[in-house]
Image: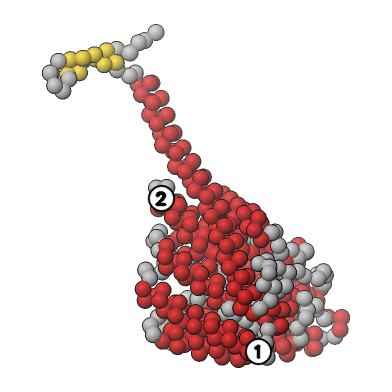
Amino acid sequence: MNTPQATQIPTQQTGQTTPRMAVAPAGREMVQTAQTESVRATPLVTLAVVTVLTGIGAGIGGTLLAALLHIVQHLAFGYAEDQVFGAQSFLSGVAAASPERRFAVLTVCGVVAGLGWYAVHRYGAKLVSIKEAVGRSRPMPVGSTLAHALLQIVTVALGSPLGREVAPREIGALIGDQLARRAGLSAEQCRLLVACGAGAGLAAVYNVPLGGAIFVLEVLLGSFAWRAVLPAFATSAIAAAVAWIGMGAEQQYTLPAFDVTAPLVGWALVCGPLVGVAAWAFARLTESARAAAPRDWRAPVFALANFMVLGLVIAWYPQLPGNGKGPASLAFNGELVTALAFVLLVLRVVFTWSSLRAGAAGGLLTPGLANGALLAVVLAGLWNGALPQEMEVALGAAALIGATAFLAVSMRMPITAVVLALEFTHVNQDFLAPMLLAVAGAACTARWLDQRVATTKSRGNGSSTVPSASAG
């Protein structure tokens, strides 16, 4: 048996030689392999721990934001003040409030929105969106991001027509960003954790674990690789489970039983492209409003004027305040007539645009869902009026299909939109057929419109295009 041979090396101080055991080649390879495996294992363990903590943090953050939303809503409009997560809906609370109270609350909303976002942009660090944090690995400023998220929650609770889903996404992304950087993870892993934190925040507030994970993969990362799939699924599942402790495993929308009929499938084929055109235009409209929003002294003035006008209008239409869940619920349950759906659709589009143009911030997920549902009720009403009775479609079923297609195009996320619609409503999976047909028709139409605009621009016959809705 071979034994390690002794070699002589000089000492640094005396120059004398001292024996040292030489390691055989096979021994060196074993030592190097063990060291390499240890180096690889340590980041994987760290990544796993940070992934779990990101899911927990996003779940806690989403629960706290939801609690804040409900508390402000109840106190502002004076309903169910003894319950945080009560059974009474926001729409019923607004409808029960007097017109004077509604106007006063929306006036306060304008003051908070205008002064709040003016202060954030004037005195806070420059905001870094989730898209920038994921794409460029830019750190998200803690103070400005927290203030930005809290302002969204408070203003939506006070009646802003924008969505509340960006705030928990930002908080989840901020938690993932801070944990990943403090743990010394690589830039690629930091971007991954930011994206997963954002999806986990969405999963927590809406109880959509699969939708949150698919949002990460389709919208934020654009990849379904295993290294992205596993953290995305883990963080979203953990965040949703954590949120169950505080909010319960509630379903966002409760629908009656729908049948998938041949006329409904035909309606989905016909109306998909029409919904695609409307959603494409809505995305461009809202992006132009965001791009032109003031950041100076005009912001408080514009915001106050915008929300005071909204406060006057909701004296007649209490369905307008909030992120659109109320009108969407009415549409899904078939409780809207065509004329009212049309009026609400026009008013919601106008005030969503004006609120963004005035400098308010918020999401467009639930507003897009509501707009699609209202548009579908209008189109289905026209369909039913023009065709024989045996070709009629249920307004609620049409609303769900139209809402999914509208969301798919307006947010540029067809797969996520379908998954979210299923998790929001727990509708029968037979509905996948007409939903997918409508989404395909809407997405193809929007793609064709994008190509037409790009061709026109390249020929020098049109103005520059406006980017589509971003992911935050």
Could you say whether the residue bearing mark 1 is in a helix, strand or loop? helix
- Residue kind at label 1, given as amino acid type: Pro
Q: Foreground residue, 423 or 434? A: 423
Where residue 30 appears, x then y in whole percent? 41, 25
Q: Foreground residue, 278 or 145? A: 145
Could you say whether the residue bearing mark 2 is in a helix, strand or loop? helix
Question: In the figure, residue 80 lies in which quadrant?
Answer: bottom right
Image side of residue 51 versus residue 428, left or right: left
261 w.r.t. 47: above or below: below
Gap between marks 1 and 2 measured at Cα: 50 Å
Foreground mark, 1 or 2? Answer: 1
Toward the front, the furthest residue is 82
Where residue 363 appears, x then y in whole percent? 55, 73
Residue in the picture at 41% in, 87% down: 298
Residue 312 seen in the figure: yes
Residue in the picture at 52% in, 59% down: 172
Where residue 60 appears, x then y in whole percent? 57, 57
Question: In the figure, residue 91 lies in which quadrant?
Answer: bottom right
The crowd level at tag 2 (other Cα within 10 Å; few <14, some 14-19, many 20+) is few
Q: Earlier in the sequence, mark 1 or mark 2?
A: 1
Where residue 380 appears, x then y in whole percent? 75, 82
Residue 293 seen in the figure: no
Question: Which residue has dot 2 on it?
Answer: 182
The crowd level at tag 1 (other Cα within 10 Å; few <14, some 14-19, many 20+) is some
- Residue kind at label 2, given as amino acid type: Arg
Image side of residue 302 versus residue 251, left or right: left
Toward the top, the furthest residue is 1
Question: Which residue has dot 1 on it?
Answer: 99
